[in-house]
Amino acid sequence: MAPSLKILSAGLALLMGGCTMIPTYHRPAAPVEKKWPGNGASETVAQDAVDLDNWRNFYRDPVLQSLISAALTNNRDLQVAQHQVEAASAQFDIENAALFPALNGTAGANVQKMYSRIWSLSQGNEPFYMRQYAVGFGISAYEVDLWGRIRSASRASFDRYLSDALGRESMRLSVIASVSVAMLNWVANNQALLITQHVIENRQKTYRLVEQTARVGTGTQLDVAEAEAALRDAETHLQIYTRQREQAMNQLTLLIGGAPDQATRLALEKKASLDDVQAFPDVPEGLPSDMIARRPDILSAEQVLRSANDDIGAARAEFFPKIQITAANGTASNNITRLFQSGMGAWNVAPQVTVPLFDAGRLTAELHQAKARKKEEVSRYEKTIQTAFREVADALAGRSTYLKQLSAQVALVQASDRQYQLALARFKGGYDPYLDTLVAQRTLYDAQLGAITTHLQQMSNIVTLYKTLGGGWQGTLPHRKDNVINHIL
């Protein structure tokens, strides 16, 4: 390295390498239990955690993968979050640029008309012109960051950038889960719609049968009215599930940023049941509670806390003297034709030191404010952890109970179907009134709809558990270009 470059580097290191007033950062202890309620810790968590990283390993259904890929590309909320990250990155560059002197080129001319009497140059009052031309470069009011005020603000800005970047990753996981649940809702409503259409066909047949029995005298008009009411009830549900299915599609369209392509739409419409959706792999058993530390929303909250800690350093540095330097170098002449001739050089240096003497307590109040904001962010960070713990605990509680509930609901459907078939056979044989058949028919329909609802809840709960554990995020942020500060020294 040439001597002049070594001197420049040493000078920059002296100007920017001063101390900082940022307090030593200590991560607050997580205010939660070490184990989930009813769920022990596992020594193999590190190996198990690998399975959570890639969302394609969890969402294995081809249709669902296609919808998620479209959402990650076109979802407007993700695009807004991306632009916020870019703005935060630019703000860091703005704050960081204050560490370096801004060099500006200047060129100017000053022409004044004067009279000789003003300067006592003669007894007359003849006009003459004073001219001054200058060309040069210089720096204006550059603050030497001896106490780390600018570096503290720069570090705080960088931590806020990281917080926004992690917030975008958190939103990405939410979008993936929302697309999954929306598709499951569409399939569940489609399944309920198909079952309702089948129920309507059966109730139409039953209605005609009851009408026939009433005509021959073995039935009553009350039976006919009850059969018709049951039919109209099913027709009402048909419109409800038709509407809900379309609304689920509208939700999917919003999430993926546009209508699904034709191939995806056709493949989706072939799913007549939730059983047609490829099953999700179960999340490993025995995960310890500190697994949630990998969640990007918790990491984002911590970066906000770090930025508040950095702001304390900036507030402390305000109590110390500020050194500002204004300097210029160039040429000057009263004749523009001689501006660049030898001997026309000119320069000036104007250092200034500002010492706070009296401000009516403003600097002290700003420091107290920075400390209070840090305490606020500590509480917010702890609340984020507690909320995450509760979300995972709820999903874990639902994992086993929903499976047992679904098993019981399927058994209820089978028992209700047997009850209905027996009641219908006895009604046709003239052994029982139609009311028994109607009750059994409604019980079967309610059990079928209940099974769909429970199955939807069980699958949605698995999605929620995967999301709340930070599944789908590999723990890396997109590469950011290095700032000039990383290369100048």
Image (tube, rainbow, N blue to C red):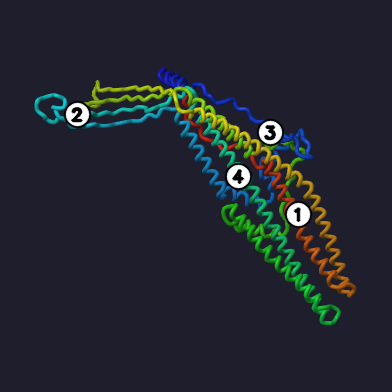
Badge 1 marks a residue whose secondary structure is: helix
Query: Which mark, by number, is residue 171?
Result: 4
Which quadrant of the figure has residue 475?
Answer: top right
Q: Is residue 405 above or below residue 114?
A: below
Residue type beneath disc 3: Ala
Mark 2 highlights which residue?
130
Residue type beneath disc 1: Thr
Residue sitting at x 33%, y 30%: 105
Residue type beneath disc 4: Met
Can residue 287 be seen at all in this image of the molecule?
Answer: yes
Mark 3 highlights which residue?
30
Badge 2 marks a residue whose secondary structure is: strand
Q: Is residue 463 above or below residue 253?
A: above
Which numbered disc, 3 or 2, marks the residue that appears first in the sequence? 3
Residue type beneath disc 2: Met
Residue at the far bottom: name it.
Answer: 216
Badge 4 marks a residue whose secondary structure is: helix
Left or right: 268 in relation to 159: right
Disc 3 from disc 1: Cα separation: 34 Å
**Label 1 near label 4: C-beta < 8 Å?**
no
Residue sitting at x 70%, y 47%: 463
